[in-house]
Amino acid sequence: MAHIVGGIGTSHIPAIGLAMARNQCDDPYWHSFFEAYRPVRSWLEAARPTVAIVVYNDHGLNFFLDKMPAFAIGAASEYRNADEGWGLPTLTPFPGDSAFSWHLIESLAAADFDLTTCQEMLVDHGFVVPMQLLWPNTAAWPVRTIPICVNTVQHPLPTPRRCLKFGEALGRAIEAWPADERVIVLGTGGLSHQLDGRRAGFINKPFDLYCLEKIEHEPEILARYSIRDLVELAGSQGPELIQ
Amino acid sequence: MAFEPHLRGHDIWGTTLFDGKAAQRGYPLNKMCFSFNDAANREAFQRDEGAYCRKYGLDDAQRDAVRRRDVLALIEAGGNIYYLAKLAGIFGFNVQDIGAQQTGRSVEEFRAMLRAAGD
C-alpha cells in the first residue's frame, strides 16, 4: 500500500527559480534562504519518496479566465513547464503517474470532490520552483509527480474549510492506493504577501508564525477563516495559504 | 497571539479583490496578457502596441493604462496581477519594481520595507 512519508510546505516565488538559474544562491540576498533548504534535502534523501503530489496554484499559464476550475488534477504521463512570459528556463519534463492520478480522481469523487481532470497540463512556477528547491538536480527528477491546482486567481476561491476537507480526503485516497509507493505531499502556496494595489508589499509576520504553528498542530483553527479574512490578515495573495 | 475571524466587514485599504465583476471588466486586458506566455506574441506587441491592444479589444482606459505602464490604473481597469506580471515582464519589470511603483517608493525603499517586515 502507498503511504505518506511526509508533507512539506514551501514558497514558490519565481525569483527563487531565477536566482537558481543565474547561480545567485550564495549571494548575500539569497544565502540564508537557500541554506535553510539543506536539512530538507537531507531529509528527502533519507525518506526516499517515489511520488510527489504537488498542491499549487496556476498563475495564468495553463488556465485562463475563460475556464477557471476550483480544483484541477493532472492525469498525464508527463508535465512540462514554459517560460511564462519572463524567459524562465524550460526544464526536463516532470514524469507523471496517470494510473495513480485516476485512482485519486475516483477516490476524491467518491468523497464528494469533483475535480477537473487534465490529460494535458502545463505546470508553472507554483509547481516548478518547489520541485527545483527540493531536488536541485533538474536533469533527472527522482520522483513521479501529480499536480493538483487550486484556484487562487479569481474570487470566489475555495474556502479554507473546504481545502482542509479536501486535504483530508486526499490523504485517505493516497493511503488507499494499492501500489507500494512512498508519497510526499507538497503544499506550495504562500504566507502573507501582496503584489497589487497601494498595500503592495504587505507582510504580517506574527500571523505567518501563527499559521505555521496551527497548520502543524491545529489546522481546524485556520479553517475558521474566510478568504476575505485571509486577504485582510495576509494580503491579497495571502489566500495562497489554502494550498 | 489570536487572530479572530469574521470580524471585518469594511473595505480593505489599498486592496482590490479580483472577483466576477473585475474578471468581466478586465477580460480583454487579461486575455491579452495571457497571450504573452508565447514569445511570438510578446514580439508582436513590441512591434506595434496600439495595434496589439486593439486586436484584443481593450477599451480606452485599458489602452491608456498600458501606454502609461500604470499598474494601479491597470488594476482599476480590471487587470489581474498574475496576468499583468507577464505584461510587466515585457517592460523588464519584476514584482518588486511594480510594488515600488504602486506604493510610490523607489525599488530600494520597497525592498527595505519587505526586509524590515521580516525582522
Image (cartoon, rainbow, N blue to C red):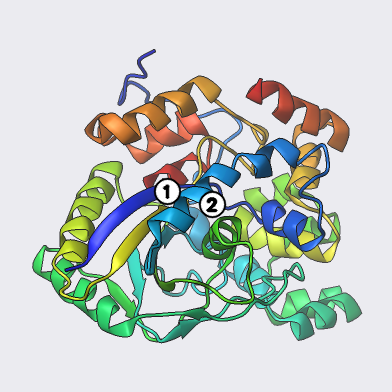
Q: Are marks 2 and 1 in contact (CB under 8 Å)?
A: no
Kindly identify which chain the residue marked by label 1 belongs to.
A
Quadrant containing the N terminus of chain B is: top left
Image quadrant where residue B40 sits:
bottom right
Which residue position is annotated with label 2?
Answer: A41
Looking at the rendered structure, the kind of residue marked 2 is: Arg
Relative to A78, A160 lies left or right:
left
Q: Which mark is residue A8?
A: 1
Q: Residues within 10 Å of mark 2 (few under 14, many from 20)?
A: some
> Is residue A119 something one can see in this rendering?
yes
Asked if A218 appears above or below B53 in the picture, the reply is: above
Q: Earlier in the sequence, mark 2 or mark 1?
A: 1
Rendering coords of residue A6 (x, y %): 34, 51
Camera-nearest residue between B62 and A186: A186
Rendering coords of residue B64 (x, y %): 80, 59
Camera-nearest residue between A43 and A116: A43
Rendering coords of residue B33 (x, y %): 67, 69
Image quadrant where residue B16 sits:
top right
Q: Secondary structure at mark 1?
A: strand
Camera-nearest residue between A100 and A160: A100
Q: Which mark is residue B19?
A: none
Q: Residue at x 17, y 64 (%)?
A: A173
Relative to A50, A159 lies left or right:
left
